[in-house]
Image (spheres, helix red, strand yellow):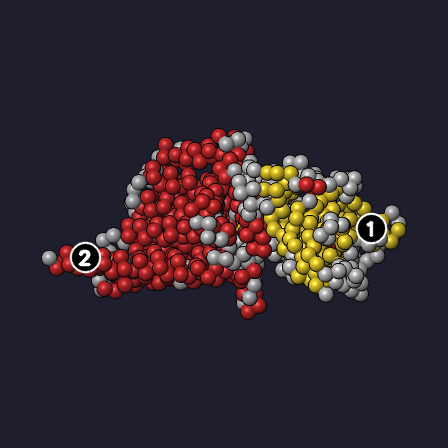
């Protein structure tokens, strides 16, 4: 009876804690739902718009996004939820909804993992699952990753955690299905692959179980294929992604941050070999134990995998220690309860003390990984820009990451062997020693290669003379007698305010470079005004003295388009090389004649938040034979006086799927009661700063035309009307009025839209 009452009491407390955790998890995320990140503006927001503007699920047949179809299914689902069921939800919140939902799936998986691992540990362990649920849900990096960033790391990590739970619960088929879902969302789920080899060696997992993974992956790609996406493209998404970035570390806090980029090819090759060796070392070290893998062994092996694999693999982003953030917290909860349980049971002796000491060390691990990951996040996430002002940069915390691995991994792998069979301890130590030695030899070979005078190319070497990257735009600007700009390449031919523009420049040194010239990029409007944007950040690359005359080298820079930029706008980018001694720019010439080294005219559109309300608004009028130019809104004052100016503000959208417009001119006419035109203004959008020929399908543009009223204009009631004509032929575009039903259209007389009545008073 007492036991039943106690059990009921623990259940009530657990339920209350979970409810409190859910409420707290929702409340802590609410303030960040409307926060825009660069990824939402430059990628996720555009993908959402493409889905909404191109038929919902039918858009999945196109390749319009960098992520896999599995992620796009979730984004499509949330688009339907917002557009149909919850129109009051903002687009930014809708984009973040799948990521936030994944946080709760992770927390539920953490609950089940801890419950399984702690089964039979006594009363102390009764609250551990609920505590794990709350702790995972409120981890700073978890909240930031989903609610602030809107990233997908929680989605694949949720699949990884459920895989671990099912393995702990001895349900391998479900584990592999969960892992297949995780891989379909993000390839980084393979960080736990050594765990599967360990279980295969212990015969607790069969090869037939592993076949479930590609089956689930292919099944998840099938809807996109049926909707029209080429099968090889859908199934091979990760092959395409592998070639997108040519950098050994995309901000990940691992040792590749310290490897010069000129060793990219050799670094990738060496990194893949090191990764395979590290995975084998983990699997073999755990497999040396004679007993079967219990839930605790599975959890600890998974933790070692997500600590070691992202540290030794190249080409990883700053977010990819996210599984280590979460798993270290789960293990810390188990460790805390194990220490308390050991103290309650009064375990004494060296074995009890040693076990508690090792558990206590694991309690500190999640703190270390929060610091490590937050330092990496701060390099790209504007919301964490304050971090680097007060704390060291990510390279310092990379050493903390290395220390955690060096201390924790041997401790975990040798855990059972310390007080057990001496032969077991020797075997585990041998595996660790051989694996570490081979990896150290590979790293040493890289270091030797770096030190050899002729054994390395200069940073980002591209090709021999006369060769450029495909799709690069050729140019020829010479800087002094030192360097020639031979081309540039912009992977995304536009950016948005508050977004980031990636600029690839290709240079050819004309002679051996003895000075470390600084590369500077400035942005200007077409009228020559500075947009007050520049990039002169030093690249972490080999010195210019390593450049070989006649060969071509790539320099990649990022330009952040701040909210202070007057947009939409056409911008030109000026490329300069600065003498480090004098601070003066090297003289730029083209064909021997002095020139202004401006290249790459780039459209800068309005940021996502500014135009969010207009992205799905129905048009009030349309222009063009195919009604491709949509007028969404027009506004002007109702009353004015002679000698004043009337500003007419219009909001436009180029219809989704429409071809790029030619060069158009907008006009506003003021018509008197007797039908005579008494004032007019004709201008390209934004005074020519953002012509229609650079608009892209789905883009929203806000324009303003200033109509000057004549001084002798008599008082009275006048009519403002709007039209569009082709700049080259002066021929008006047909204008159509939209009825209540968007399918009903009527061509307007004289192809003009009556905007409003204007009362002129003296």
The C terminus, quarter of image: bottom right
Residue 154 pos. (x, y %): 44, 50
Give percent across and percent down for residue 255.
55, 54
Q: Quadrant of the N terminus?
A: bottom left
Of residue 424 and residue 37, the one placed in the foreground of this image is: 37
311, 612: nearer the viewer? 612
Which is in the foreground here, disc 1 or disc 2? 2
Residue at (46% x, 47% y) in the render: 82
* Left or right of residue 73, residue 587 in this image: right
- State the image quarter where residue 489 is shown: top right
User: Which residue was labeled with disc 1?
Assistant: 478
Upstream in sequence: badge 1 or badge 2: 2
Determine which of the numbered discs, if any, sits on residue 284 in the image.
none
Mark 1 neighbour density, 10 Å: few (under 14) some (14–19) many (20 or more) = many
**What count of labels does the image hold?**
2
Closer to the camera in the image, 714 or 270: 714
Task: Tell me if residue 481 can be seen.
Answer: no
Residue in the picture at 48% in, 42% down: 76
User: Badge 2 is on which residue?
Assistant: 8
Distance (Cα) linking label 1 and label 2: 80 Å
**Which residue is drawn at the image coordinates 49% and 50% (left, top)?**
95
Q: Is residue 371 left or right of residue 659?
A: left
**Residue furthest to the left:** 1
501 in relation to 582, above or below:
above
Q: Residue 342 falls in which quadrant of the image?
A: bottom left
- Measuring from the top left, give residue 251's x and y in whole percent: 56, 54
Residue furthest right as drawn: 592
Is label 1 in a helix, a strand or a loop?
strand
Q: Would you place residue 657 above or below residue 710 in this image?
A: above
Q: Are marks 1 and 2 in contact (CB under 8 Å)?
A: no
């Amino acid at each position: 009876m007492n036991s039943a009452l106690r059990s009921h009491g623990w259940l009530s407390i657990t339920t209350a804690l979970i409810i409190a955790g859910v409420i707290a998890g929702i409340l802590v995320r609410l303030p960040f739902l409307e926060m825009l990140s660069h990824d939402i503006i430059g990628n996720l927001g555009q993908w959402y718009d493409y889905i909404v503007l191109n038929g919902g699920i039918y858009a999945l047949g196109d390749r319009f996004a960098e992520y896999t179809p599995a992620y796009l299914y979730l984004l499509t689902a949330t688009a339907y939820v917002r557009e149909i069921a919850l129109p009051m939800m903002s687009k930014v919140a809708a984009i973040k909804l799948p990521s936030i939902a994944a946080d709760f799936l992770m927390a539920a998986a953490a609950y089940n993992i801890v419950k399984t691992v702690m089964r039979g540990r006594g009363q102390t362990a009764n609250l551990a699952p609920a505590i794990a649920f709350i702790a995972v849900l409120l981890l700073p990096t978890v909240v930031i990753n989903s609610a602030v960033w809107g990233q997908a790391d929680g989605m694949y990590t949720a699949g990884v955690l459920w895989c671990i739970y099912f393995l702990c619960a001895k349900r391998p088929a479900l584990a592999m299905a969960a892992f297949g879902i995780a891989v379909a969302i993000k390839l980084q789920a393979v960080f736990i692959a050594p765990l599967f080899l360990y279980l295969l060696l212990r015969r607790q997992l069969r090869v037939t179980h592993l076949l479930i993974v590609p089956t689930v992956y292919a099944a998840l790609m099938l809807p996109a294929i049926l909707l029209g996406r080429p099968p090889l493209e859908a199934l091979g998404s990760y092959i395409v992604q592998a070639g997108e970035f040519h950098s050994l570390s995309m901000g990940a806090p691992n040792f590749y941050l310290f490897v010069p980029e000129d060793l990219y090819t050799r670094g990738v090759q060496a990194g893949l070999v090191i990764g395979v060796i590290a995975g084998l070392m983990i699997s073999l070290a755990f497999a040396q134990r004679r007993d079967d893998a219990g839930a605790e062994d599975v959890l600890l092996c998974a933790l070692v995998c997500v600590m070691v694999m992202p540290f030794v693999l190249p080409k990883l982003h700053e977010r990819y220690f996210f599984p280590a953030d979460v798993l270290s917290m789960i293990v810390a909860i188990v460790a805390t309860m194990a220490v308390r349980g050991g103290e309650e049971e009064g375990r004494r002796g060296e074995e009890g003390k040693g076990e508690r000491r090792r558990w206590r060390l694991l309690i500190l691990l999640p703190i270390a990984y929060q610091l490590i990951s937050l330092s990496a996040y701060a390099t790209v996430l504007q919301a964490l820009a304050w971090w680097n002002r007060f704390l060291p940069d990510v390279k310092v915390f990379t050493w903390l990451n290395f220390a955690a691995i060096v201390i924790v991994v041997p401790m975990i792998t040798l855990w059972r062997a310390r007080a057990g069979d001496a032969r077991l301890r020797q075997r585990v130590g041998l595996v660790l020693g051989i694996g570490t030695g081979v990896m150290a030899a590979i790293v040493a070979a890289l270091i030797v290669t770096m030190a050899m005078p002729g054994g390395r190319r200069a940073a980002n070497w591209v090709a021999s003379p006369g060769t450029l990257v495909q799709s690069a735009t050729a140019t020829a600007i010479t800087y002094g007698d030192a360097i020639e700009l031979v081309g540039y390449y912009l992977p995304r031919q536009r950016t948005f305010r508050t977004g980031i523009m990636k600029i690839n420049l290709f240079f050819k040194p004309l002679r051996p470079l003895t000075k470390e010239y600084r590369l500077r990029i400035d942005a200007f409007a077409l009228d020559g005004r500075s947009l007050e944007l520049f990039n002169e950040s030093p690249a972490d690359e080999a010195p210019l003295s390593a450049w070989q005359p006649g060969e071509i080298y790539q320099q990649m820079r990022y330009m952040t388009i701040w909210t202070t930029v007057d947009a939409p706008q056409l911008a030109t980018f000026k490329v300069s090389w600065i003498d480090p001694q004098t601070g003066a720019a090297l003289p730029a010439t083209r064909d021997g004649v002095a020139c202004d080294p401006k290249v790459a005219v780039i459209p800068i559109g309005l940021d996502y938040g500014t135009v969010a309300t207009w992205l799905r608004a129905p048009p009030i009028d349309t222009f063009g034979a195919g009604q491709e130019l949509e007028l969404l809104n027009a506004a002007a004052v109702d009353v004015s006086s002679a000698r004043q100016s009337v500003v007419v503000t219009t909001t436009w959208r180029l219809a989704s799927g429409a071809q790029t417009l030619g060069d158009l001119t907008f006009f506003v006419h003021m018509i008197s009661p007797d039908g005579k035109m008494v004032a007019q203004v004709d201008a390209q959008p934004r005074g020519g700063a953002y012509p229609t020929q650079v608009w892209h399908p789905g883009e929203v543009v806000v324009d303003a035309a200033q109509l000057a009223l004549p001084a002798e204009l008599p008082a009275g009631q006048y009519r403002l009307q709007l039209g569009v004509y082709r700049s080259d032929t002066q021929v008006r575009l047909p204008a159509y009025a939209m009825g209540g039903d968007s399918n009903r259209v009527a061509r307007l007389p004289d192809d003009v839209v009556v905007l409003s009545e204007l009362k002129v008073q003296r």
